């Protein structure tokens, strides 16, 4: 067990939750200096204290020890990925529809030009039958 890595995970999780060292010390019922010594490595982390810290951080103990994510963490990450994918898909679909509408507009313009040219050719054939 690498206690330095565990302490770093504790700091990372504490900071991500916006908890101060003072808050952690209060919840653990220890002095701020004692808590700082836990994070700095001066005090050896023992399992009961580590379990309490994991509970405060709302993380399974194994997450702090082995840096693994819980199924809840994976679910949250998956939700974020699904949302981003859906947004990109929606953007792509919207962009496709816009492009399609632009192309349909271009086709209509070309059809109108073709009809105009055919009308002109018809008028010229009537007036100038030798051509």
Image (tube, rainbow, N blue to C red):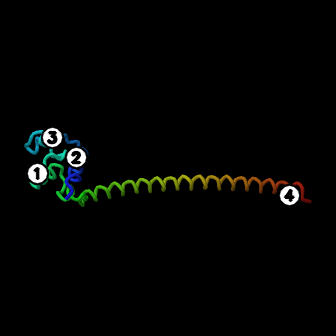
Q: Residue 11 carries which label?
A: 2
Secondary structure of residue under mark 3: helix
Quarter the N terminus occupies: bottom left
Task: State the residue position of label 4.
Answer: 125
Of callouts 3 and 4, the N-terminal one? 3
Q: Which of marks 3 and 1 is nearer the N terminus?
A: 3
Q: Which of marks 3 and 4 is in front?
A: 3
Please report whichever mark, 2 or 3, sits nearer to the chain's N-terminal start.
2
Few, some or many residues within 10 Å of mark 4 (<14, 14–19, 20+)? few
Q: Which of 44 and 76 is in front in this view?
A: 44
Q: How crowded is mark 3: few (under 14 residues within 10 Å), some or many (20 or more)?
A: some
Q: In which quarter of the image is residue 100?
A: bottom right
Question: Would you name the residue on which mark 3 appears?
Answer: 23
Q: Which mark is nearer the camera, 2 or 3?
A: 2
124 left or right, relative to 97: right
Counting residues from the start of the chain, the first of labels 1 and 4 encountered is: 1
């Amino acid at each position: 067990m690498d206690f330095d890595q565990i302490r770093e995970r504790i700091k990372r999780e504490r900071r991500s939750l916006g908890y101060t060292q003072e808050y952690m010390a209060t919840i653990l019922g220890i002095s701020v200096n004692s808590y700082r010594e836990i994070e700095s490595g001066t005090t050896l982390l023992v399992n009961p204290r580590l379990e309490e810290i994991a509970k405060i951080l709302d993380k399974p103990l194994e997450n702090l020890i082995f840096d693994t994510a819980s199924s809840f963490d994976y679910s949250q990450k998956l939700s974020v990925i699904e949302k981003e994918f859906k947004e990109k898909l929606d953007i792509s679909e919207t962009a496709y529809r816009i492009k399609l509408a632009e192309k349909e507009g271009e086709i209509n313009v070309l059809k109108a030009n073709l009809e105009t040219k055919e009308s002109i050719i018809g008028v010229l054939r009537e007036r100038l039958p030798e051509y």
